[in-house]
Amino acid sequence: MRTIPTALTLALVAATTLAHDPRTTARELGQSLALEGLGRLELKYKAMHWNPTAYERFQADAAVRERVNANVWSAIGTVENGFALTVGGHALPKGSYPFGIQIEAGGQFSLVLKVGADTWTIPFEVTTGGAPTEYLSFALFPTARPDTFALEGRCGTFRGTTTLTVPHLTDHEAVKPH
């Protein structure tokens, strides 16, 4: 009779010991952009913790990289857009889409969007250096053009950027920055 409670206690201790440290697991984050009269663009995602050892393994082992890209990194969040966008030359209609990133060999990263049955892989322009960012994070920045926004992802010492264009804003030549 004592073996069942003892076994259960050992299983609970082992599970607790092997569980992820809550300080290093993914955090739920988001970024949004509201355009008056058009709607909102919202990015909701899991901010994965930067792990240099795992990154080195991804670079060295193509099978591990492919498996992690397919099962973890390619589906870390959702893009909910209330207006049409152009991302990496692709027209993205109003809607909700799963998104993630893809880690490539040689330090290249891409944005991954799942649109219906299609998967779009949009390369980031990547730079390295600077202070490391411990968790994957995204930010939207306005640019000098009223129809163009920069989407920037950071993790570790990597910074990747791509542009989002709002076609509805393109024709408004009269709109000038203040």
Image (tube, rainbow, N blue to C red):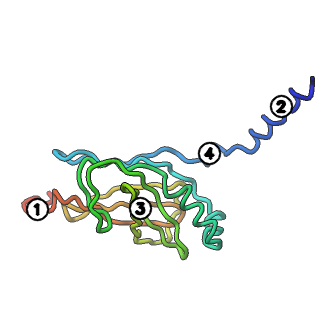
Q: Quadrant of residue 168?
A: bottom left
The vertical placement of 40 against 149, above or below, is: above
Residue at 52% of width from left, 57% of height from top? 73
- Look at the numbered disc 4 and give the secondary structure of its residue: loop
Q: Mark 3 vs mark 1: which is more N-terminal?
A: 3
- Indicate which disc, 4 or 1, sits on the residue closer to the N terminus: 4
Mark 2 nearby-residue class (10 Å; few <14, some 14–19, many ≥20): few
Location of residue 148 in the rendering, given as x and y in whole percent from the top left corner: 24, 62
The residue singled out by tag 3 in the image is 119
Name the residue beneath numbered marker 2. 9
Front: mark 2 or 4: 2
- N-term-proximal mark, 3 vs 2: 2
Residue 23: which numbered mark, if any?
4
The answer to which of marks 3 and 4 sits earlier in the sequence is 4
| Residue drawn at point x = 64 percent, y = 73 percent | 60
* Image quadrant in which the N terminus is located: top right
Which label number is shown at residue 171?
1
Q: How many marks?
A: 4
